[in-house]
Image (cartoon, rainbow, N blue to C red):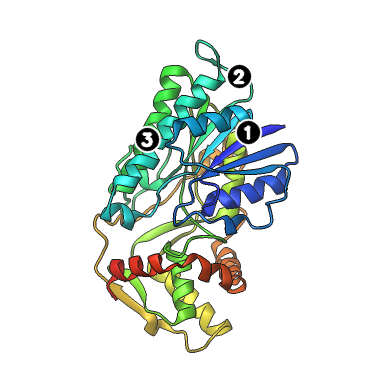
């Protein structure tokens, strides 16, 4: 049985990955470590508490002794590092936690895994693997007519968040180059789906529609993102963990580029037609653009298509409806995660 350490497993992508992996493979035990910040919520994993193949430990990955104990106690042979501060707006206000978790935390995981897994010079226990879950934001911004990011695109981050993720990626690459450490890096486009914290774009729109609150759009809404349904992303990460080439980078994208304003109008129209006809485009309000706002992200996932036979199964038109329906069915979850602290942050950030 493989023992997979999932860091940040109470967050959006991490919790979806845990559910995916436990449903996918009975020969896997998952050890979830999460320090449970505002975006980490054990309600994301409700129903797994009694599963003998699931273990939760409340741990900060910057705590060396705690990480070492968990690695040794559970004989961990695979690490999937989701743990990260990930909201660009928050990184602009205060980069400190992004540097600590995203860079220092990554280095601690790498160092402890290297020490525990080493069996000789540049040799590691059979079957060990570390996967760094990164983002397309490390590549910077594309113009409208530029080709999509490939794994060879130079890194050019523009926010404290993306700079911290790029730094973590460089650490992982350095551990492979220097020590032949068994690591891979994945870089994904924007994820969406169940259990995403409502400060993120799509659940924020859904939540504001339900509450008849104004929907803040940065600038003129023309910024473009490539959207990837979270379960498709989880499948890709698992394929990299099992069969990815050591030392390689894999771009994971959905081939679903949309402008922000297209997304907003799509959700509003669905809510108007299926939930409440008083929900309409009058809720849209344009706010001052984000500092250093990247114009466009676009992922070329050809490498993972060819090498690992991964193709996203969910088209955006289907995935967005599935996502809206999930939030409509889980409004109690939504209310529970939107705390007073979040409301204060939201009002301060958007000033509307």
Question: Viewed as shown, does residue 318 lie left or right of 81?
Answer: right
Question: Viewed as shown, does residue 54 lie left or right of 203?
Answer: right
Select label 1 or label 3 by which is in front: 3
Q: Quadrant location of the C terminus?
A: bottom left
Q: Earlier in the sequence, mark 3 or mark 2?
A: 3
Question: Judging from the image, what secondary structure is the residue with disc 1 in?
Answer: helix
Instruction: Work out whether residue 142 can be spotted.
Output: yes
- Comparing 149 with 66, the one in front is 66
- Marks 3 and 2, how far apart in space? 24 Å
Question: Judging from the image, what secondary structure is the residue with disc 2 in?
Answer: loop
x and y, in percent, of residue 172 in the image: 43, 30
Give the residue at x 29% y 45%: 96
Q: Is residue 346 above or below residue 227?
A: below
Q: Is residue 336 above or below residue 161?
A: below
To which quarter of the image does residue 283 belong? bottom left
x and y, in percent, of residue 212 in the image: 44, 82
- Comparing 79 with 145, the one in front is 79
x and y, in percent, of residue 63 in the image: 44, 35
Residue labelled with disc 2: 125
- Marks 1 and 3, how far apart in space? 26 Å
Q: Is residue 335 above or below residue 238?
A: below
Q: Residues within 10 Å of mark 3 (few under 14, many from 20)?
A: some
- Marks 2 and 1, how far apart in space? 15 Å
Report the disc number at residue 242: 1
Select label 3 or label 2 by which is in front: 3
Give the residue at x 28% y 57%: 293
x and y, in percent, of residue 12 in the image: 52, 54
Report the disc number at residue 104: 3
Report the disc number at residue 29: none
Residue found at the very far right of the displayed protein? 26
């Amino acid at each position: 049985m493989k023992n997979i350490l999932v860091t940040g497993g109470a967050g959006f992508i991490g919790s979806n990955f845990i559910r995916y992996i436990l449903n996918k493979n009975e020969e896997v035990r998952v050890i979830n470590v999460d320090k449970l910040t505002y975006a980490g919520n054990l309600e994301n994993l409700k129903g797994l508490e009694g599963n003998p193949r699931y273990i939760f430990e409340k741990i900060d990955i910057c705590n060396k002794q705690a990480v070492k104990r968990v690695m040794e106690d559970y004989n961990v042979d695979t690490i999937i590092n989701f743990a990260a501060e990930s909201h660009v707006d928050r990184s602009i206000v205060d980069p400190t936690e992004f540097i600590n978790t995203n860079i220092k935390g990554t280095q601690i995981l790498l160092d402890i895994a290297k020490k525990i897994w080493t069996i000789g010079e540049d040799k590691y226990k059979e079957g060990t693997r570390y996967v760094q879950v990164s983002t397309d934001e490390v590549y910077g911004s594309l113009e409208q007519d530029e080709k999509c990011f490939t794994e060879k695109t130079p890194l050019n981050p523009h926010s404290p968040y993306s700079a911290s993720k790029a730094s973590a990626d460089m650490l992982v690459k350095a551990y492979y180059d220097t020590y032949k450490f068994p690591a891979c890096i994945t870089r994904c486009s924007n994820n969406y789906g169940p259990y995403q914290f409502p400060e993120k774009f799509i659940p924020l729109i859904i939540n504001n529609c339900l509450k008849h609150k104004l929907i803040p759009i940065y600038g003129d809404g023309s910024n473009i993102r490539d959207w990837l349904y979270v379960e498709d992303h989880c499948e890709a990460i698992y394929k990299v963990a099992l069969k990815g080439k050591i030392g390689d980078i894999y771009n994971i994208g959905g081939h679903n580029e949309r402008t922000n304003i297209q997304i907003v109008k799509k959700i509003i129209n669905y809510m108007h037609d299926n939930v409440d006809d008083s929900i309409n485009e009058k809720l849209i309000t344009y706010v001052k653009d984000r500092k250093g706002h990247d114009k466009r992200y676009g992922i070329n996932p050809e490498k993972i298509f060819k090498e690992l036979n991964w193709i996203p199964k969910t088209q955006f038109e289907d995935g967005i409806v599935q996502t809206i329906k999930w939030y409509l069915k889980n409004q109690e979850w939504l209310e529970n995660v939107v705390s007073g602290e979040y409301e204060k942050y939201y009002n301060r950030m958007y000033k509307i």
